[in-house]
Every structure is written in C-alpha cells, then in structure tokens.
Image (tube, grey):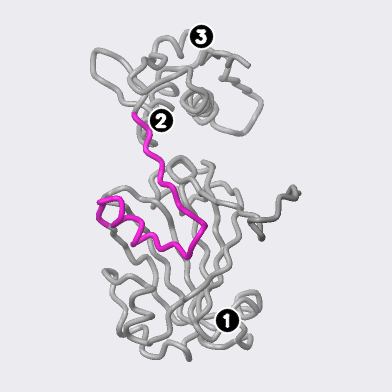
Amino acid sequence: MEKVKRSWADEIVIRRHLNTPLYLQLKHGPQDWITNGLEEGFLAAGQRAPSENELKEALGVSSITVRRALHELERQGLIRRIQGRGSFISEQSSVILSMEKLFSLTTLTLEKGMEPARETLELARIVAPLNIARQLDVDEGAPLVKLVRLRLMDTTPISVDTSYLPLDRFPDFMRLYQSSHSLYELMHSAFDNGPVRAHDMLQPVLISAFESQVLQVSEGSPAILVRRVAYNRDDVPIEFTKSVFRGDLCRFSIEFKEKNSHDNQPVDF
C-alpha cells in the first residue's frame, strides 16, 4: 500500500486549555512528522523543515515559543539550523542495543568506534529497602552500594543508570571504584564476581526533571526504562540496575527463534 505523505501542519495540534507548555506542544508535532517521515520513507536527511515564520503564522504563536521549540528539536538532533537559510532535517543515528546477549554499553560503544564515558552522579552506602532487597535476594536493611552514573557515547548522553550492589558480595567497592571503570570489568577483575546472565524488563516512560538535566532532553520526552537483575556464575543476583535510555536515540533489537528449528509447526505469540 502506498505511503501517505503527511504535511508537518497535519501533525501539529495546539490545545491552549492544557497545562502542557505551548513550546512542547509545538515541538512534538514536527518531531512526530520527522520521525514518521524518516521511518516511512517520505522524508530524508537534508530536506527542509518548517521555518520559524511558517510555524508562527500557521499556529498563531509567538516567536519566542517557536524559537524554543526549534531549539529543542535541534538539541535532540532532529534538525540543524543554518543562519539565513532555515532549518533542515538531520541525519539520524540511532543506537541499536541488542537483547540477544548480555549487552554492555561500554563494549557496544567501543564496537561502534566511539569512546565510552561515564560521569558518577552519586556513590553512596545505603540500607536495602524492601523492593530492592527482594530483587537482590538479601535481607531488608542489608548494606548496599548505590551508584548513579551518566553514560555517554563520545560526548552524547545516552542513559542514566542507577545500580545497587550487595556490599557483602563486593567489599571495598567504595574505595576501588573510579568513574573511568567499567562496572562489569571491575566486578570481574577485582572481585571475581561478575555477571554471566541477566534478566531485563523494558518499559516506556517519560523523562523526569532530573533526567532532563543530565540527558539534555526536554522533561516529558519519551524514554526506555530497563530494569536489570544480573546473576553470577552461581546464579546469585549481584546487581539490580534501573537504566533510563533516551528514546530519541536508542532502539532495542530482539531476535526470536523457534525452540526446535527442525519443527515446522507455527509459533504463536
């Protein structure tokens, strides 16, 4: 079936009675138009995006509102603005995260020829609340390491990770850890207690105010929350992590196979 080429004007709906700021409502329209257009093939990188004047006149909003919306689109990497020429659709580069094996963002970044970077936002000793204790199979109130990190590929923020490790399984972690370390490499090399398998759960969420600041995207932007419990060679849980990935940059790839490849029976999902 032939794809319908939609105008940017068809994607923008301004509802002035809502509490959502106008610039965010204005941003979401072109954002959907660009994302859908690139996926469906009726748009390509380098094509012209609507100008400030076109948006202002069509929607009856102020120049300040339009400029703020365009700034957010540019910051997300959806458009590039050239002085005196206008706005143009940028080349989109998604990060594909394979769920077919125990993925490490550090390893993935290196495989792409990019430089992994980490910023430690919090490193603290805490007592385990009940929900996290259950994930790690420890007693409520047991000592844990809480590690919050911003993960970057080159200079681009990709995710915010909040990790919890049982302190009795990683003694002296607080002294040994440095921001330059890969967490999994440190767990293996310093403690001989690294993960060999993990159970991940994915959930769509919206970026919080804190995540907006560190990931450099607008509050309320789409994101992907990955909850992970990682297990060591003895099948003991050694890490519980909540990672918030930018929805505008990250994609997850999952491959399914029939249990018995020689069995030609159809598979129901």
Residue 213 in percent (x, y) is at 40, 49
Residue 35 in percent (x, y) is at 49, 29
- The amino acid type found where label 1 is placed reads Ala
- The amino acid type found where label 2 is placed reads Leu
How many C-alpha atoms fall within 10 Å of the one at disc 1: few (<14), some, or many (≥20)? many
Label 3 close to label 2 by CB (< 8 Å): no
Q: Earlier in the sequence, mark 1 or mark 2?
A: 2
Tell me the residue that label 1 is attached to.
Answer: 128
Asked which secondary structure carries label 2, the reply is helix
Magenta run includes residue 149: no
Magenta run includes residue 104: yes
Front position in the image: 162 or 106: 106
Tell me the residue that label 2 is attached to.
Answer: 73
Q: Residue at x 30, y 23 (%)?
A: 81
Which of the two discs, 3 and 2, sits closer to the camera? 2
Write the start and end of the magenta stretch as one range. Answer: 91-115
Q: Distance between the residues labelled 1 and 3?
A: 54 Å
Q: Earlier in the sequence, mark 1 or mark 3?
A: 3
* 24 shown above or below 150: above
Asked which secondary structure carries label 3, the reply is helix
Q: Is residue 186 left or right of residue 27?
A: left
* 249 shown above or below 129: above
Q: In which quarter of the image is residue 140?
A: bottom right
Q: Quadrant of residue 176?
A: bottom left
Q: Residue at x 60, y 20 (%)?
A: 13
- The amino acid type found where label 3 is placed reads Ala
Q: How far apart are marks 3 and 2 (CA)?
A: 18 Å
Q: Which of marks 3 and 2 is nearer the N terminus?
A: 3
Q: Which mark is residue 58?
A: 3
Q: Is residue 42 left or right of residue 200?
A: left
